[in-house]
Amino acid sequence: MALHRAHALLESLAPEPRPLTAGHLPFVGADATPGSEDELQTVVAGAQENCDLPRVIRESRFFHNLFSRSRSGETSRSMPAELEQFLNDTRGVWENSWIRFPESRLSRYALQVLQADLEVQGQDGFRERSDSQRFRFRENGEPWLRVPMSYALKLALADVLGTQRFRARPPAGHLPGLASRNGRCARIGSSDSASAIST
């Protein structure tokens, strides 16, 4: 896919002028992965106690069960040791980690976009999705968010739109090309994989 885009880009930069069509631009045509997490290849840098991936691992049922089974002799002790070695990596670089931050960092409009993406339509109107607790939690009594980087970029764009002083703000469900209740644009996905943005 990357080779396809690189070839299209080189063609568009050819010395002989030629019309530039949508098929020659990135993220269209044969590219089936627009804005997905695997395309962004993100890393999060920081101490393990401040970053999402190591915290999620340490708080997981898998982590506690692994160490319990190791202590009881049901599984090898090398597995927990390797996991601890990974979590105690002093470089503080976590590939494909989500990020977490206080909700208070977002503008009112960005919060409206988030709320619209965390809702589903039922028979009696819109209600919060059943998996919203994956993205919202409380820390020290304050509401926080944990989201994949690709969705954080969407929130960042909404935040910018929401803080422009002399520009009309579109409704939260009508952020051009980004937020939509119809499920055709980037939204928080319900997949358990690291790529948690669906289009």
Image (cartoon, grey):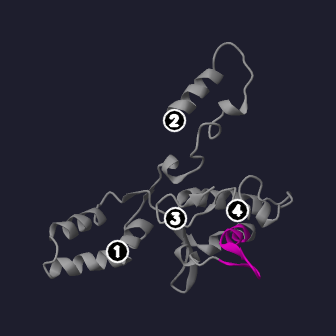
Residue 191 badge = 3
How far, Cα to Cα, is label 4 from label 1?
31 Å
Residue 71 position (above or below residue 176): below
Q: Is residue 183 left or right of residue 72?
A: right
Percent x, y of residue 185: 69, 56
Q: Is residue 122 magenta?
A: yes
Q: Is residue 49 visible?
A: no
Between 55 and 129, which is closer to the camera in this rendering? 129
- Viewer-nearest residue: 4 or 45: 4
User: How far across and down, in percent of the image, does residue 151 sit?
Assistant: 60, 60
**Which of marks 1 and 2 precedes in the sequence?**
2
| Dot 4 amino acid type | Asp
Residue denoted by label 2: 2
Q: Which residues are magenta?
A: 111-128
Q: Quadrant of residue 152?
A: bottom right
Vertical arrangement, residue 12 with respect to residue 182, above or below = above
Looking at marks 4 and 2 on the same chain, the residue that comes earlier in the sequence is marked by: 2
Q: Percent x, y for residue 96?
A: 44, 57
Whether residue 113 is visible: yes
Alpha carbon distance from label 1 to label 3: 21 Å
Tell me the amino acid under the disc marked 2. Ala
Camera-nearest label, 2 or 1? 2
Q: Which mark is residue 58?
A: 1
Q: Which residue is mark 4?
A: 159
The three-letter code of the residue at mark 3 reads Ser
